[in-house]
Image (cartoon, grey):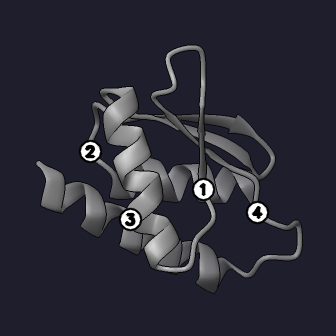
Amino acid sequence: TGEWFRQELRTTLSPEIHVDGRGLMIGIRLASAAGALRVSRELLRCGYIVLTGGTQGDTLTLTPPLGISRQTLQRFSTQLHAILSLSS
């Protein structure tokens, strides 16, 4: 499921956004720490708990439960894409 979800994110998001991770622990590196913080707050408003991290604070860190459904992951991916599209 982790590899599938990383590929889903890579396909859904723009090419300049770096997606990496192991299993379901995933990092999504954005252009800036301020942007990552803004996106994490928007996701929280939508019901998704996403923290920022990375050495520059520019990475969204995802640690969903192991039993999460693909449907929920797809909804997250769609919501993240919508939030990022509004900010461009």
Q: Which residue was labeled with disc 1?
A: 50
Q: Nearer the viewer, mark 2 or mark 1?
A: 1
The vertical placement of 55 against 86, above or below, is above
Give the SS element for disc 2. loop
Q: Residue sitting at 59 percent across and 14 percent down?
A: 55
Residue 42 tag number: 3
Q: Residue sitting at 69 percent across and 36 percent down?
A: 21
Q: Amino acid at mark 4?
A: Pro
Pointers 3 and 2 in contact (C-beta within 8 Å): no
Pointers 2 and 4 in contact (C-beta within 8 Å): no
Tell me where residue 11 appears, x and y as whole percent: 38, 53
Of callouts 1 and 4, which one flags the residue occurring earlier in the amino acid sequence? 1
Instruction: Give the camera-side residue of 4 and 52.
Output: 52
The vertical placement of 3 against 77, above or below, is above
Crowd tier of the residue under label 2, counting other residues whose Cα lies within 10 Å: few below 14, some 14–19, many 20 or above: few
Distance between the Cα atoms at labels 4 and 3?
A: 17 Å
Of callouts 2 and 1, which one flags the residue occurring earlier in the amino acid sequence? 2
Distance between the Cα atoms at labels 3 and 2?
A: 18 Å
Q: Amino acid at mark 3?
A: Glu
Of callouts 3 and 2, which one flags the residue occurring earlier in the amino acid sequence? 2
Q: Which residue was labeled with disc 4?
A: 64
Q: Nearer the viewer, mark 3 or mark 2?
A: 3
